[in-house]
Image (cartoon, rainbow, N blue to C red):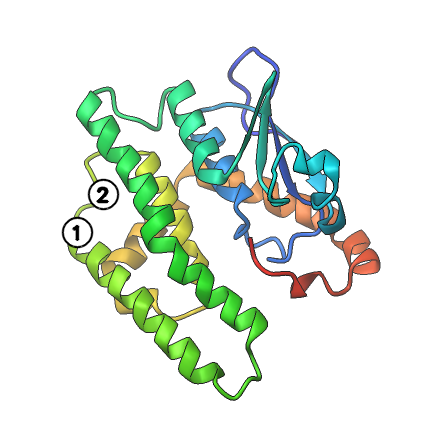
Amino acid sequence: MRGTMMQQQASPIITVFECSPDQGKGMARDMRVRWALEEVGQRYDVRPVSFAAMKEAAHRSRHPFGQIPTYEEGELVLFESGAIVLHVANRYKGLLPEAANARARATSWVFAALSTIEPPIVEREVVEYREQGEPWFEQRLSAVDDRIRIRLNELSRRLGEADWLDGAFSVGDLMTIDVLRRLADTRLLEEYPNLLAFVARGEGRLAFKRAYDAQHAFFKAASAECKRSSPDRHKETPQ
């Protein structure tokens, strides 16, 4: 597997789900790394790992918490999608502005996406996976949705009528859009037309489409074997 060709060097390697629980929809966190690499024109390879292998010593040496993605580039090994995407943005041109203050603001949006916007969205996913069928499920889901709306209200006001969060498209937009995409199976984004359009603009970028097509093709190629070997993979908690 690879992104687009460009740099003449050994390709970085990212780990991905061997059997993705999102059914090839590009919701796993390797998607944001793939997208970043495509935006900067850096080819890459993937190493698929099973849910069992993620908890074994070999993978934990790359990711101490036994998750994906990880990133290997020569002797450098990184874990956590935000750290990986920021490394890519700093190493290659295309995702960070030249001006120092603008670069700092783009970095702030990466942290905001991961630390402020994403947590209640992931909590919603966990509630759906783990608590559906419980007598408190609807009340709990409604409470989490209200917390998500607080963040969406704030983000919507900040974005306003602009195309991107701070001038030209940057790593901050990439990370924020990828986090918002996790709401695709809900109707929450429909309440915020400017955020819905913001996500659509990101998904319309050629680099996003290349990244999405690559991960979807990988899922399709692996899907038959995944069904035979792990029929309950959809029960895994989302990552």
Identify the residue position indicated by label 1 in the image: 158
Q: Quadrant of the N terminus?
A: top right
Front-most of residues 57 and 215: 57
* The quadrant where residue 147 appears: bottom left
x, y percentage for residue 115? 35, 49
User: Which label was assigned to residue 8?
Assistant: none
Question: Which circle's residue, 2 or 1, is located before the other in the chain?
Answer: 1
Q: Is 73 placed above or below 227 here? A: above
Residue in view at x 37 percent, y 20 percent: 93
- Quarter of the image for residue 118 reads bottom left
Left or right of 137: which side holds 238? right
Task: Residue 217: tell me if it is visible.
Answer: yes
Q: Quick one: 213 or 25, which is closer to the camera?
A: 25
Question: x, y percentage for residue 51?
Answer: 71, 51
Residue 169 seen in the figure: no
C-alpha distance separating marks 2 and 1: 8 Å
| Residue hosting label 2 | 165
In the rendered image, the residue lying farthest to the top is 8
Task: State if disc 1 and disc 2 touch (CB < 8 Å).
Answer: yes
**Element under label 1?**
helix
The residue drawn where x is 56% and y is 24% is 43
Residue neighbourhood size for the residue with mark 2, other residues' Cα within 10 Å, grouped as few (<14), some (14–19), many (≥20): many
Secondary structure at badge 2 equals: loop
